[in-house]
Amino acid sequence: MHSFLDFDQARDIAKKHGTPVLVLSKQKVIEKYSKLSNALPRVSLYYALKANPYVEVVRILNEVGSNFDICSIGEFNTLQGLQINTGNGRVIYTNPTKKEEEIRFIHGQGIDLFVFDNSLELRKIAQSAPGGNVLLRLEVSNPHCVVNLSYKFGAEAGEAEPLISEAVSLGLNVKGLCFHVGSQTANPQPYVDTIMTCKKIADRLTSRGIRLDLLDIGGGFPVAYTSSIMPIEKFCEPINEALDNFPPDTRIIAEPGRFLVGDAIVLITKVIGKSRRKDVQWYFLDDGLYNSFSGKVYDNTDYNIISEKTRNREQCVVAGPTCDSFDVISTKKVLPELEMGDLLLVTSMGAYTSCSASEFNCHKRTPTVVVD
């Protein structure tokens, strides 16, 4: 919830680049990658590009040794454009539902690990990537996540063995199981429960002569927005204990996105208007829901807005710059009295913000600058 920028730094950046502007901290990305790597010592990390495919984010993570999780040809092209080695298992393609031409293209590029969760998808993979490697995605029951990714994807546990048997009959190489507990999960228990479900499935398959040697525990590791979260070291303790139930030669991977980049970007935005409407104070900013605050819509995220002023705090409405009444960032923020031209800092703007922004009203997407 704290900004890695102070207001003097923000003024210097705004003077040089204008506002709104997103500021990416290289050191913050490196720090978060190191923290998660240390907290999950047995797990290889595959950064989920969908969280933020900005080339400098990807470049930084490549430099520290991250692998990559992609879900589209466009994301593959981002890696190619940076001349990142996409072979040797460094990239996985985890979209559970794919076009046949996607599968053929990706397979032809040497990426040979695909995800499925139903029989039709299996047949598409078998036809477009014969003999390919596959992971079965399981659904997860987790009512406490912010975004339920099992609403759209994942087979029930009871479907696992029949689907894996079908994959084997189609000549595919079933490497293992994967799951995603849901985005912004504040409690590690869903990881533990699903890991143990995977272990039971793996044991039953082993007794039938089908050995699984890979487990993908997905993403969902949380970021602090407007409330505190459990330290990642503490969060991962029960996950590590659950993983210890798998044989030492089982390869464990994860697909973190938000955790690695969420805290690494701060938005500098400016007050461009104010109005008192029905005795409620309104402030209008030069960024809004159609741009960097898009995560408010698509990701159910509330963002921490910081002012350097402290006096005359009151509940107010904060709105964006477009000519649309939908473009309201918050109706419940408590802020000090602001004036035209005042700068505000918005923290944890690195994930699912600029990547889902639009150019509605012909407002350009907010640019990003990099600082050490």
Image (cartoon, helix red, strand yellow):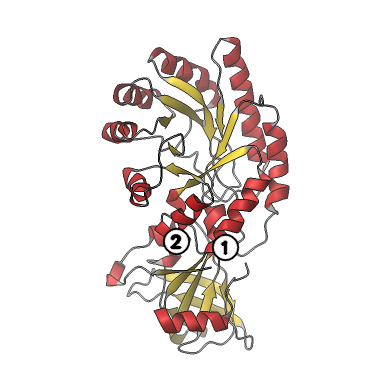
Residue 145 at x, y = what percent? Answer: 58, 47
For residue 27, what is the image quadrant?
bottom right
Q: Residue at x 65, y 52 (%)?
A: 35
| Residue placed under numbered mark 1 in the picture | 27
Q: Residues within 10 Å of mark 1 (few under 14, many from 20)?
A: few
* Horizontal side, residue 182 vs residue 115: left or right: right
* Horizontal side, residue 365 vs residue 37: left or right: left
Of the residues shown, which amino acid type is indicated by label 2? Thr
Question: What's the CA distance linking mark 2 and mark 1?
Answer: 20 Å
Residue 372 at x, y = what percent? Answer: 53, 68
| Residue placed under numbered mark 2 in the picture | 353
Q: Residue at x 46, y 88 (%)?
A: 341
Q: Residue 187 or 264: which is nearer the viewer?
A: 264
Residue 299 at x, y = what percent? Answer: 48, 55
Q: Residue 311 or 277: which is nearer the viewer?
A: 311
Q: Secondary structure at mark 1?
A: helix
* Outermost residue, top side: 208
For residue 106, what is the image quadrant?
top left
Of the residues shown, which amino acid type is indicated by label 1? Gln
